[in-house]
Image (cartoon, rainbow, N blue to C red):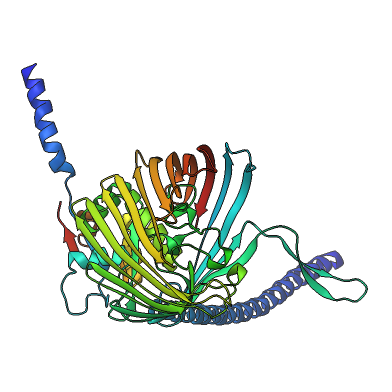
Amino acid sequence: MQKIFFLIGWVLCLSPLAFAENIAVIISEESPLLANKQTFELKEIEDIYTGKTKYLQGSFIKAVNQKDKEILRQFLKKTCRMDIAAYQERWIKLELETGANAPRIIETPGEIIDYVKKEKAGIGFVWENQAKGIQGIRVALLLAE
Amino acid sequence: MRNKIMVFGIGLILPAFFLQMAWADSSELQILKEEFNQMRQKMETMQIKIEQLETGQSKVAQTVKEEVAKEVAEKGPSRLSWHGYFGWHFEDETRNTINPTFDAFQLSLVSKVDITEKMDLYSQFVYEHAPFYEISVSSATGARTLDSRSSGEFTVNDAYVTYTIDEKLKLRAGKFATPFGLWNTLMYAAPTYVTVKQPGRDTFYDRGSDTELDAYFFGRYSMGAWLLGSYDIFSYDFYVVNGRTTLAQHRDDNRNKAIGARLGIDLSLGSSSLKLLYSRYQEELRASTTSPFFRQYTNALSLEWTINKFKLTSEIEDSQRQGAGMTALYVLGQYNLTDKFVPFAQFQFHDPDKHAPKSKTSYITGGLAYQISPWRAMLKFQVDRVLPDNAIESDYWRFLTGVAASF
């Protein structure tokens, strides 16, 4: 019996580690958004996703969100320090008050990668392991767990 | 013998005949084969030509597609954006003098066009109370007239161009909702707030009873020029505009002038954020063409404090006009219970003349917003207790329910 409890305890201890994963903010390999820099600052990502920054290096930024609520929740918490409801509330105000367009919602990580590959001024986010080894994209910022 | 010769003859003729036939068949076959080969070659040539044409066409189509994509990529995903919102509500109260009312209060269409990277045009058209307009044609004369068959108005709420020099400095010109406090620029946008009507609608954003003055504390609409910008946690607005009009229905008489400013600071720490605004509106105005000019100064402080799922919104203002001091405030608390339910409570207070006795009114509100789709579609329920502190009215209840949607 003790062994079973020990095993359950061990699994419970490890489970947060097993699900802990970094988020990769990705852009096209040919993206003009970063100019000569290697990575974005966290504040730059926040400004893009909260609608404060619309253009970078003369290009209209095409930010996209992922439909999966878990990665979206973690991404917004790390970058904009908001939960999903507060983020939606902010964007509805921006849309109606300024006519801005909220980042498009894309269904799957694969579609986000394809979008970013095609759109040179595109920017999106996926789990780090989903971006590994993919040609045509680069990781512009890694959001650590 | 004769028979033998005949048989021999037939024996010779028949094979020769069949041989001739066979030879004739084989030569015709040869000709047919050659013709067939020629036709096949022609078909193959035609097939190659068709394929070449098709490839050429697809290449052209591909080139066109790439060019369009390139142009779109260079100019942005959408140079024109459309948004809008809708609000409907039902209101009843325990005062016998007021009838219960259904109201399709607003239908708004918001558009923005990026003219260039630096310049955009924003407009908002509002159908207030769902007006019904009709162009009728006289069968006798053919003359056309615009008829209105219901109450309500179609208004151009906003129409302005913005030139962005930098995020720190933007220039704006046109007609706009005055940037005063937290909600004036979103005054009708019911999906952006949980209350049935704009928060502070009875007090801070009260329109008063003077039709000509439009609002007690500041002009709701402005025609003029507006400077705005933000840097880091700071933001500002400064505007010079035509003031409130002495004519009904917002018809501009260009008689009064106003200036105003709004300074803001956005702070965030962990999962909490704090937004503070100071607004100032100053106007030289007169209530009629014959009355003398006087000045009105209004100062306001606004606060929006979010702590996790709880949000506190509060605004307080004070104004001086012709020796009368006016004040108004409201406090609104809301809690995102789940993604769906947002209970809220509001307290409002209004004193249109601080020196006059028994001129105050307080409002206590409780309600619930149900998010059909978060901040896109909402059902709202609200109960108000209105507490007038005067000799004419006694306390009464007000019941409101509403639907708000946006796209």
**Vertically, is B141 above or below A20?**
below
Residue B326 visible, this angle: yes
Residue A136 visible, this angle: no
Residue lying at 25% horizontally and 56% vertically, measured from the top left: B274
Is B139 left, or right, of B301 in this rendering?
right
Looking at the rendering, which quadrant does residue B44 occupy?
A: bottom right
Place of residue A67 in the rendered image (x, y in percent of width and height, measured from the top left): 36, 52
So how many labels did they put on this image? Answer: 0
**Vertically, is B177 above or below A85?**
below
Place of residue B45 in the rendered image (x, y in percent of width and height, measured from the top left): 57, 82
Residue lying at 44% horizontally and 66% vertically, measured from the top left: B218
Looking at the rendering, which quadrant does residue A141 occupy?
A: bottom left
**Vertically, is B231 above or below B102?**
below
Is B256 left, or right, of B145 in this rendering?
left
Place of residue A85 in the rendered image (x, y in percent of width and height, measured from the top left): 35, 49
Q: Quadrant of the N terminus of chain B?
A: bottom right
Q: Nearer the viewer, residue B68 or B343?
A: B343
Is B336 left, or right, of A42 in this rendering?
right
Residue at the outermost right position: B140
Is B32 left, or right, of A72 in this rendering?
right
Q: Nearer the viewer, residue A24 or B168?
A: B168
Q: Nearer the viewer, residue A141 or B81?
A: B81
Looking at the rendering, which quadrant does residue A110 occupy?
A: bottom left
Place of residue B13 in the rendered image (x, y in percent of width and height, measured from the top left): 78, 72
